[in-house]
Image: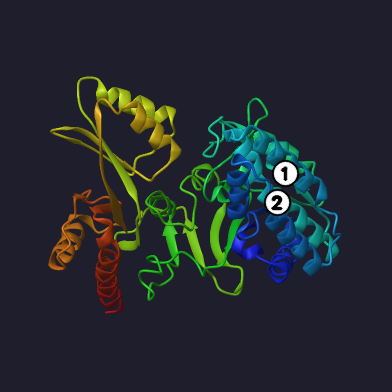
Amino acid sequence: MKFGGAGLADGPAVRRACELVAAEAAAEPVVVVSAHEGVTRALEKCAQRAASGRVELEEVRLRHKGLLRQLRLDSELLDRLLGELGQVLRGVAQRGHIQPGELDFVLSMGERLSARVVAASLRATGVAATPVDAFDLGLTTDSCHGHARPLPGVEASLRRSLEEVPGTPVVTGFLAADGGGNLTTLGRNGSDLTAALVAQALGATRLVFWKTVPGLLEADPELVPEARIVDELSMAEAEALAFHGASVLHPATLEPLHAGQTELQLRDVGCPELPGTRIERRAPGKAPLAIAGHRELVGFRVEGEGASAHLFALMHAHHVRPRLLRVTARGVVVHCPPSPGFELLRRELSECGELLPTSSSVVLVGGGGSGFAHAALERLLEAGIVPRHADLESGGLWQLFLLDPAQRPEATRRLHALLREVTARRRSRSST
């Protein structure tokens, strides 16, 4: 059972999560938690201020002290961790800059504090629970601070360690350690990846992501308020949506689950009676399913003999995973979400490369073949939206349109309307 930060936002939310865990006590659940809502942002600000010479920890301290009061827990429960955080921030302030490993340490405190709060709250309700830092379970990664990836074979260590934890383990999401014991973090929504690794290690029958949304939606509700819940989808479709920008899942979340039989669900922590979205082990469907996309993609073109090989080597070294890669008459073009790794890549290739205008992507995920792909392109052109590039993957799992960022909202709405029309026609045919 994995609980996101919004589902642990305050005392009542933590109690609600604990009630869900207690209801599953007979199934011996393992719990994975994110930081309480807003805490990671507050820790980022603490790190930035420390790098400029100021140690300001009160926002984080008061937030957690308030949670302890709401839950009627020991007011000194978190003092040791808060003291460690203050000590690191003072060291940063003295030097005037923060190292990547120190930033990971600061950001990891959100999950470490959250695990202690949730475990103590469970114990207060009569459920034996133990907070556990994921690195103490043997979750080992590479040394890419901020975007670390698990090393092969961590499942055995996780399984052995979890079997020794008394009561219900409450595991920190998002954080790990490299082979040298240095703390690392897994990037945006990394707690989902932690939960998937734990589920795979234990051979869990079910993995439930408890979110504050009713499930995976057909499109970004900020752009398409009428977007509906996707009741079920395949693993491949879910991976495509995550990779292309759907924020509900970490892009790497599903990778550890391919080998097992774990049932995966996205559920609403505020309405646990709703079924949410199921992610199933089956072939992808034959119709469009949902729309994802990135608000911002940075592009770079490299030219010259040997430049493309150098580009691929640097992408591997800096953990850059392009959302679109294509070969043109002028060289190789990559488009990626902004990241420190991309900035390093761009600097190292500045003599043989060119930074391209920032773009957005709108991606239709699901089957439908070339006929639907071209219908989607026509729908955009009818609205005066001319893509900078279209990757239509005839008969494939997705179709990607690269756009001027200002056109992304209207393009999303137009393609969602087409998706709903296709879905309505399919339902009409099946009913007759």
Q: Which residue is mark 2?
A: 57
Give the camera-side residue of 27 and 48. Answer: 48
Q: Cα distance, mark 1 to mark 2?
A: 9 Å
Q: Which mark is residue 408?
A: none
Relative height, residue 219 to residue 403 (above, below): below
Residue nearest the viewer, comparing 225 with 289: 225
Q: Earlier in the sequence, mark 1 or mark 2?
A: 2
Tell whether 133 sits left or right of 376: right
Local crowd at mark 1 within 10 Å, few (<14), some, or many (≥20)? Answer: some
Tell me residue 64's x, y (percent). 74, 59
Q: Which quadrant, please, contains the C terminus? A: bottom left
Nearest the viewer among 269 and 349 is 349
Q: Which residue is mark 1?
A: 85
Q: Are marks 1 and 2 in contact (CB under 8 Å)?
A: yes
Mark 1 or 2: the one toward you: 2
Q: Would you say 106 lies left or right of 301 here? A: right
The image shows a total of numbered marks equal to 2
Q: Nearer the viewer, residue 27 or 410?
A: 410
Residue at image position (32%, 44%) is 298
Helix, strand or loop under label 1: helix
Q: 243 above or below 405?
A: above
Q: Where's residue 23, x and y in %?
A: 73, 67
Which picture quadrant has residue 186?
Answer: top right
Mark 2 nearby-residue class (10 Å; few <14, some 14–19, many ≥20): some
Most extreme residue toward the top is 306
**Tag 2: residue type?**
Leu
